[in-house]
Amino acid sequence: MIFKNKLLDNQDQFRMHYTDPEFHLNMLNRFLALLPPSPREYVVVSIGTDRSTGDALGPLVGSLFSEKKPRHISIYGTLDNPVHAVNLQDYLHQIETSYRHPFIIAIDACLGKQHSVGKIIAGKGPIKPGAALNKPLPAIGDVHLTGVVNVSGFMEYAVLQNTRLQIVMAMAKLIADLLDYVDQRLTYRKRMPAVVSTTI
């Protein structure tokens, strides 16, 4: 739903191609460094829709991560119940009223330059869904994980519709695994709040 690689804060980002053999270890280390040292209630918001192949990254991540039955992280945005432009504000209100000072991990697909396609980006700060299409949607996320699924610049809707499912699915699996590793390292016995252990 981000459509173009426009993030609110381009600092503190780390990018790796999903086929990089060092992806799991390096991305996990970088992502753990973005998480807070004190206990928080962790919430993943996976943005997108299954009506467009390129924009299905978020719902796929949400569904794959849900199947792992995380103990410390709540999930919004799956194939069954996607979070998208129409209902994003409603879900944000629900999260704000259901959690005390939640730490939100935003997941979304984006379009970028040719050399960036296939890269997964971890970064500090929120993303602005729909920015490329001038949709007035709220910024979301204390940190974000985005996947560059295709090339931006012309007829974004058509590009998203014609994005290969293979690349979207491969990135979704990696991001879901990354979130599962994070959940396993949340050390507090109670479901929430929790704090992450940075020891690999």
Image (spheres, rainbow, N blue to C red):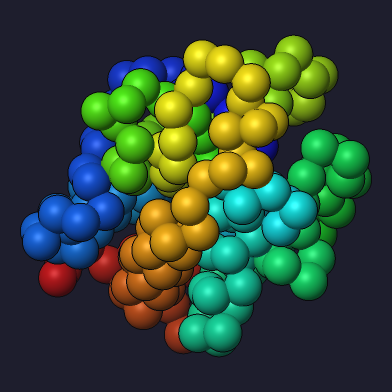
Residue 153: where, in percent of width, then height?
Answer: 51, 15
Up-down: is 15 above or below 139?
Answer: below
Query: What's the residue at 25%, 28% (across, down)?
Result: 115
Residue sitting nearer the eye, 74 or 135: 135
Horizontal side of residue 73 vs 140, given as left or right: left
Query: What's the residue at 58%, 33% (across, down)?
Result: 159
Query: What's the residue at 59%, 78% (across, down)?
Result: 66
Residue 114: where, in percent of width, then height?
Answer: 32, 26
Up-down: is 131 above or below 60?
Answer: above
State how many labels appear: 0
Q: Is residue 128 visible?
A: no
Horizontal side of residue 49 vs 97, given as left or right: left
Query: What's the residue at 58%, 43% (across, down)?
Result: 162
Residue 102: where, in percent of width, then height?
Answer: 63, 51
Q: Quadrant of the N terminus?
A: top right
Up-down: is 9 above or below 12?
Answer: above
The image quarter containing residue 136 is top right
Q: Is residue 22 visible?
A: yes
Horizontal side of residue 5 vs 159, given as left or right: left
Residue 92: where, in percent of width, then height?
Answer: 79, 44
